Image: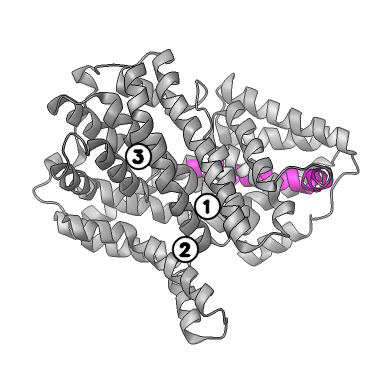
Amino acid sequence: MTRLSVEMLAADTVDPITSAGHAQLGIAVLVGIAVLVLLITKTKLHAFLSLTIGSLALGAVAGAPLDKVITSFSAGLGTTVAGVGVLIALGAILGKLLADSGGADQIVDTILARANNRTMPWAMVLIAGIIGLPLFFEVGMVLMIPVVLLVAKRGNFSLMRIGIPALAGLSVMHGLVPPHPGPLAAIDAVHADLGITLALGVLIAIPTAIIAGPVFSRVADRWVSVTPPDRLIPTRPSEELERRPGFGVTVLTVLLPVGLMLIKALVDIVVDDPENGVQRVADVIGNPLIALLAAAIVGMFTLGRAAGFTRDRISSTVEHSLAPIAGMLLIVAAGGGFKQTLIDIGVGKMIMDISEDWNVSALLLAWLIAVAIRLATGSATVATISAAGLMTPLAADMSSTHVALLVLSIGAGSLFFSHVNDAGFWLVKEYFGMSVGQTVRTWSVMETIISVVGLGFVLLLSLVI
């Protein structure tokens, strides 16, 4: 199915497929989300299946014909895959090349060699920010945790003072900056400009990571003191390589797609003429698909070949990068189906009607919705996609900058208070050797700080731009 036909199919379902009133729609949303939460948290059913069943439950309670619910879900699934599926795949390829070639370790070692005791927390948040830009959160964590544990052990540093900044850098990138799946899906759902969202996301991410990282780590260090056992220090990916790419070329490769997309955004603002040749070229090279494709191809040479990889090894690396994201793609796609079902049964219109009588900013409303779904499901991606679907009608009348801020508000809300229903919570707990209570006082509080501070900067920017 082509992108055009998918969009036409979605357009055919703009009118609500049910005549249910606001009360019934509200109950349907609660039931749909409750089914989703119970299936994910209690039965441990895969999020893809949970979202599919939750969409059917949502439509059934709303009184919509199930055949139309299935059509809405399928249309949303297809539109989401068409919009972000290829981008996620290209990002995974670049991330795998970065990890396997030793490029990530090269960035880490170069920055740490120039850091001292006072600057180490700042070095860790910088490393995590750079590493986390093209990588999924879990992959970035697996790369960063060995560094955190090794530095803490060999340099006799407090684990909290250097671990919290690293986690903050990774988490901020995951929630606020494309090409991560959540922000990409939200951008696609509300039709935000990716370049503007990226630029504003980086602008907000930097001070947010500083406050939740190096600044909060001082407090976390007073609250929790742990010494992880040696068995938790894993082997770094590049230890078996004879050589690895240089620092400069690795950073340039990682930042290439960001640079191309920012060039497009800048040219669009300065030139603002769709028929202008310069803008047309910028629109092509700054297209997310072209930007990430270029980075992936360049990375095969600047990262893969620089590490001594043969053509077969590079091909194998690319192949192995795609298998782990199959589940992520299905979850994101099903989230898009859930989002489209919400819209097509009339929930978006209901929220728009109700919010007309509220004296609440759309940015704050988006954040609150994302927070509620995040607390319930434990998934930042599910919270982002669902909240974006609910806010789609309100985004229609916003300027391009405020639609971008809407995406960032949702992203900030999706990070709020990670707890026991979030896989990341347990990953941090086990790697750092902490108890559940210690993990709540450090990791969960850090995530909450990112969420609240991120919202604060979003609201501040909304007053300025």
Secondary structure of the residue carrying tag 2 is: helix
Other residues around mark 2 within 10 Å, as few (<14) / some (14–19) / many (≥20):
many
The image shows residue 76 at horizontal and vertical percentages of 67, 50
**Mark 3 touches mark 1? (CB < 8 Å):** no
User: Would you say the magenta stretch is mainly helix, strand or loop?
Assistant: helix
Tag 3 residue: 139
Corner quadrant of residue 251: bottom left
Please, what is the three-letter code of the amino acid marked with disc 2?
Pro
Q: Residue at x 91, y 43 (%)?
A: 19
Q: Earlier in the sequence, mark 3 or mark 1?
A: 3
Disc 3 to disc 1, how far (Cα)?
Answer: 18 Å
- Magenta residues (range): 328-355
Disc 3 to disc 2, how far (Cα)?
Answer: 21 Å
Tag 1 residue: 184
Other residues around mark 1 within 10 Å, as few (<14) / some (14–19) / many (≥20):
many
Tag 2 residue: 288
Corner quadrant of residue 351: top right
Q: Is residue 40 magenta?
A: no
